Amino acid sequence: MYELTHHIVSLPTSQYIQEYRNPEKFISFCQQCERYNRCWACPPFEFNTDEYLSGYQQTYIIGTKITFETATRNSCTTLEQHKTISLQAIESARKIIDPQLLTLEHEYPDSRAFYAGTCHLCPLNSCTRINGFPCLHPQEIRPSLESVGFDIGKTVSELLHIELQWSNDARLPEYLTLVSGLFTKESIYAPISTRISSLLTV
């Protein structure tokens, strides 16, 4: 149905923040989403995002391409099929990637993972935040890079050198791109890149 490939780059966190973060611009996009203030992984947050990002030395960006088989693309003929197949592929990929990011957090103390998109831990529209209750998964939930103001489009094109593909009709694009991250207190370069690659190999 599809194949996952991972692309990993690293750069100093200070550089990533300076060149790829624009919280005012991207949080305004979040405000237009139905999950804004209704999901614990989405803005507005109860913590200061500037402080949340401070103190990290190195940033590792993980770009995951979900490349669809030709047969899968050809079988998709309606917008509903397009939506269903895309969501299933993203959810399946996240079930592989997210736990491995948490594993990396444990292996590298004081590191911080960022998921590719909104929370998938609870069913859609069932987050406890809607009714003012605490998160049911505080040890597993993580924000996305875009939710704290990073420019994912620029990250993908300039750092990962991947062209984002979109489709406004029933036909699936050749691939979808997910962007996760890991911020660390120390620069570990080759060891952590190798470890990320091994953990995410499926």
Image (spheres, grey):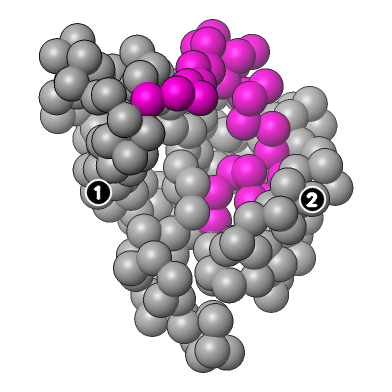
In this picture, residue 106 sits left or right of residue 168: left
Question: Which residue is at a point 79% across and 50% down the rendered structure image?
Answer: 28
Where residue 147 appears, as percent x and y from the top left, is: 64, 51
Question: Which residue is at a point 37% across and 34% down the rendered structure image?
Answer: 79
Name the foreground residue: 35 vs 23: 35
Q: Look at the image and tell me in which quarter the C terminus lies.
A: top left
In this picture, residue 109 sits left or right of residue 18: left
Where residue 161 appears, as percent x and y from the top left, is: 54, 9
For badge 2, the amino acid type reads Ser
Question: Which residue is at a point 82% across and 42% down the rendered structure image?
Answer: 25
Q: Which mark is residue 28?
A: 2
Rounded to the nearest angstrom, the CA distance separating label 2 from label 1 is 28 Å
Q: How many marks?
A: 2
- Say which residue label 1 marks: 95
> What is the span of residues highlighted in magenta in the rendered image?
143-170
**Within the image, what quadrant is residue 51 found in?**
bottom right
For badge 1, the amino acid type reads Lys
Q: Is residue 166 magenta?
A: yes
For mark 2, give the secondary structure. Answer: helix
Name the foreground residue: 68 vs 110: 68
